[in-house]
Amino acid sequence: MCLLRKAAEAWEKLLNLRYDMVFGRKKKSYVVSLSFERYDFPHLVGMQYANDVDFKINSAEYYGEKLITAILSGRLDPKRIEKSKNWDRIQKRLQVLVNLQDTLENGFSFFLFSKAKVPRYSKIDAEYLIRNNHSGEMFFVFLDKESGRYFCKSAFGSEMDYSRNQTPLTLLYKCRVEGENKEVLFQHPKYVADTI
């Protein structure tokens, strides 16, 4: 199965989930309720880098939040994206999204993010940074807040460690929410959970 389709399927599963997390540093807590929307997907997979690809359908049929439906319904052939001159760049993004749920549920480091602290110039402006610790591959997910919700702003694999020089936070509490069901995935022994 092609990587773009795998990423669409993985994101489709995340649409029903929310991760409520609490992090701490120096007696200050940071509450993040991470949710997922269809309209976040196109930028994350790198469609902006695939403008050299003819998907053989009108772009209005796969623009924005319609992309996942176009892929999963078969209207858009996801293998066509592999013809992009930017495939290497896109492929790294897709791999992150395929593994995102596993990373969120198993192993990651969390940082306050400042683009001014990145070792070289970066356009990324985000509040937080997630570094994967679970799969052995180094990839990063940048989180930001809009309209009261935290979302994945960017995600990619990189040789450069974007977490270098950033402020690490300690995970105190992590809960997966699916509809009315809540499952605590982690709770620090010294943390008393409040209702998020």
Image: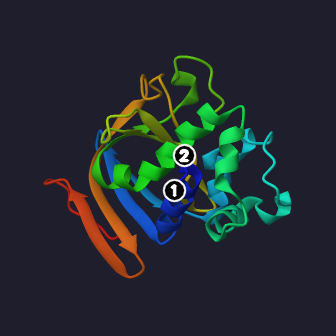
Taking the image as drawn, is residue 65 in sight? yes
The one of 42 and 163 positioned closer to us in this rendering: 42
Quick check: marks 2 and 1 in contact, CB under 8 Å? Answer: yes
Please give the residue where the numbered disc 2 appears in the rendered image. 94
- From the top left corner, tell me how far across and down residue 78 is, in percent: 65, 54
Between 57 and 136, the residue placed more toward the observer is 57
Amino acid type of disc 2? Answer: Leu
Left or right: 20 as drawn, with respect to 127: left
* Residue at 31 percent of width and 46 percent of height: 24
* N-term mark: 2 or 1: 1
Q: Which mark is residue 70?
A: none
Q: Residues within 10 Å of mark 1 (few under 14, many from 20)?
A: some
In the displayed orientation, state which residue is furthest to the left.
189
Distance of label 2 from label 1 (alpha carbons) = 8 Å
Tag 1 residue: 6
Q: In the image, is residue 48 above or below residue 159?
A: below
Q: Residue furthest top?
A: 120
In the image: residue 74, left or right of residue 26: right
Q: Is residue 82 above or below residue 120?
A: below
Q: Position of residue 177 (x, y in %)?
A: 38, 71
